[in-house]
Amino acid sequence: MTKPPWGRVPVRVRPILATAAVSVLVGGVLAGTGAANAVDPPHRVANPYVGAQVYVNPEWADRAAAEPGGDAVAGQPTAVWLDRIATIEGDDERMGLRGHLDAAVAQDADLVQLTLYDLPARDCGRRSPQGELSIGDLARYQAEFIDPIVEILAAPDYADLRIVAFVEPNSLPDLVVNTGNRYWATPACDEALARGTYQHGIGYALARLGTLPNVYSYLDISHHAEVGWPEDSGPLTALLLEAATTAGSTVADVHGFVANTANYSVLHEEYFRADDVINGQPVYQSRWVDWNPFIDEVPYVRHLRGELTEAGFSPDAGVVIDTSRNGWGGPNRPTGPATSGDLNRYVDGSRIDRRAGVGNWCNQAGAGLGQRPVAEPEPGIDAYVWVKPPGESDGTGGTPNTGQPYEPLCDPNYLPPRGSAYDTGAMPAAPPLGEWFPAHFRQLLTNAWPPL
């Protein structure tokens, strides 16, 4: 759900850190290193994932189990996406919000993850994924989307559930990288920024969710390959703070931040460093790194979390990272650093992330399941989570003029402008956003890292 930085003009040299992680999951329980505290959830806890039995979506679990080998992960917890007004009540085909909450109670789960994804002019009105609300539908978003969700969550039957809400992924980062004189700027993003539509919508959502003591709201901070550059972190921090203090919200309504939502960026690049120098050339000058001071997710989120707390967010705010599709195992995974003296060959041969371009985001070929969900995998990280249910499509993989919404970066045959040698890395024959994509799921199983 991001635009790639192909053709980015280097602005200046930009300087990092790194660490390591291990995860364990048994039967849907996120095990942490701290003491479990799953009793009486309405009393606020520092990390809602510690000791929690996290809800396993039976609809996703059934689809996963039906695939060869899928039963190995069908018991993993994934987020429930509410991406249209109709998804709140559900229909004969899919469970609604009440159905999921009732199923969580029946499972004896005590934590449910929800992704709220229906802002007016969502993703700046791009054709794929296409949002249902127009730029002028803020009042409808509030009254027909947020208010009904809050009303359902407030029911006494669900008071013992911790509700983790991932609020409007990729929206505020879009207003950083796709506005003004940026290469990928769009008039729709410029209008959304000028109107304050996203800030007001998110602020309203945070304020309403903040009235419920068992809800923990996490704001999206994208990933290092979209907003890792120094000229991005300041504007993103300002937008996050503006949204958190708009329409009745305060920073106290933000429990933490979520990174890498529905994306493929690895937690740690193990075989090269951002400060490596090859034959006198620093790694940041390579085609892949493209002057970004960050080459992986954990250093990025630690850096940005520091910026956010300095700007006024709680110093106790945690971060969760979506690891649903960032494993990059399989036969193409490197086993050590490359030995080439050529800068680009060194980086390309050493990197775990095998995308053709670091900004590629749609149905990536070669991707694998990442770390399984786990609480407190390392300091400052509340949990590794599967926000994007593995196997659900990122967008239609068709070509122009096929009668379906066309997203170039979901088209495996599309070549970006400016003569770039990168291809999209998208798998062919993908169904529309959110629909089950068996070939992609089977690939994720094959390339899982750690291996299944």
Image (cartoon, helix red, strand yellow):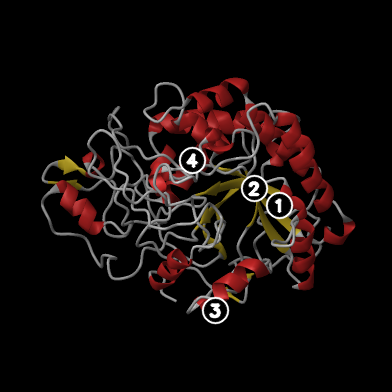
Q: Which residue is mark 3?
A: 71
Location of residue 91 in the rendering, given as x and y in whole percent from the top left corner: 74, 58
Q: Are marks 2 and 4 in contact (CB under 8 Å)?
A: no
Say which of marks 3 and 4 sits in front: 3
User: Residue drawn 42% across and 54% down?
Assistant: 264
Q: Which residue is mark 4?
A: 304
Q: Point out the tag, 1 or 3, that comes first from the N-terminus.
A: 3
Q: Point out the tag, 3 or 4, that comes first from the N-terminus.
A: 3
Say which amino acid is labelled 4.
Leu
Say which of marks 2 and 3 sits in front: 2
Q: Point out the tag, 2 or 4, that comes first from the N-terminus.
A: 2
Say which amino acid is labelled 2.
Asp
Location of residue 388 in the rendering, given as x and y in whole percent from the top left corner: 55, 57
Label 4: element kind:
helix
The crowding category of the residue bearing disc 4, from other C-alpha atoms within 10 Å (few below 14, some 14 to 19, many at least 20), is: many
Query: Residue 196 falls in which quadrant of the image?
Result: top right
**Is residue 203 found left or right of 23 in the rendered image?**
right
The crowding category of the residue bearing disc 2, from other C-alpha atoms within 10 Å (few below 14, some 14 to 19, many at least 20), is: some
Q: Point out the tag, 4 or 1, that comes first from the N-terminus.
A: 1
User: Residue drawn 11% across and 45% down?
Assistant: 279
**Is residue 247 found left or right of 402 in the rendered image?**
right
**Rendered image: mark on residue 87:** 1
Label 3: element kind:
helix
Q: Which residue is mark 2?
A: 83
Say which amino acid is labelled 3.
Asp
Of 201 and 126, nearer the camera is 126
Q: Point out the tag, 2 or 3, that comes first from the N-terminus.
A: 3
Q: Are marks 4 and 1 in contact (CB under 8 Å)?
A: no
Of 17 and 272, nearer the camera is 272
**Is residue 32 found left or right of 44 in the rendered image?**
left
